Image: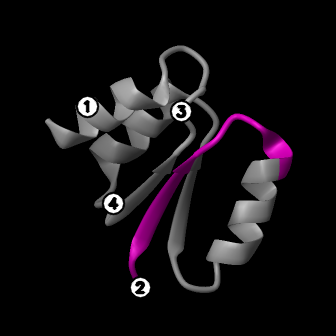
Amino acid sequence: MKTLLIVEDEPLILEMLQEILSKNYTLFLAGDYDIAIKHIKKEIIDLCLVDYTIPCNNGLILINYIKD
């Protein structure tokens, strides 16, 4: 099964996405930049769904980190 990292700081949105997407993906969840980075360094992630307005840094910084 493909892996998906969801980076979202709103608990209700994260819960909704988890419920919908867990049927087709192995999920890794992060509420902020630092947790997302830990998952990226530890796991093989096939796809990332990133909220642009996450705490600590914005989603664009995280996407650029992943890209590099």
Numbered disc 2: secondary structure: loop
Q: Residues within 10 Å of mark 4 (few under 14, many from 20)?
A: some
Give coordinates of residue 30: x percent, y percent.
58, 42
Disc 1/disc 3 C-alpha distance (Å): 14 Å
Q: Give the mark nearest the N terminus, 4 or 2.
A: 2
Indicate which disc, 2 or 3, sits on the residue closer to the N terminus.
2
Q: Residues within 10 Å of mark 2 (few under 14, many from 20)?
A: few
Say which quarter of the image contains residue 37. Answer: top left
Residue that badge 3 annotates: 52
**Percent x, y for residue 56?**
54, 14
State the residue position of label 1. 65
Q: For the C terminus, which image quadrant?
A: top left
Q: CA distance from mark 2 to mark 3?
A: 26 Å
Q: Which residue is mark 2?
A: 1
Which circle marks residue 45 in the picture?
A: 4
Category of crowding for the residue at label 1, using alpha-carbon neighbours closer than 10 angstroms: few (below 14), some (14–19), many (at least 20) = few
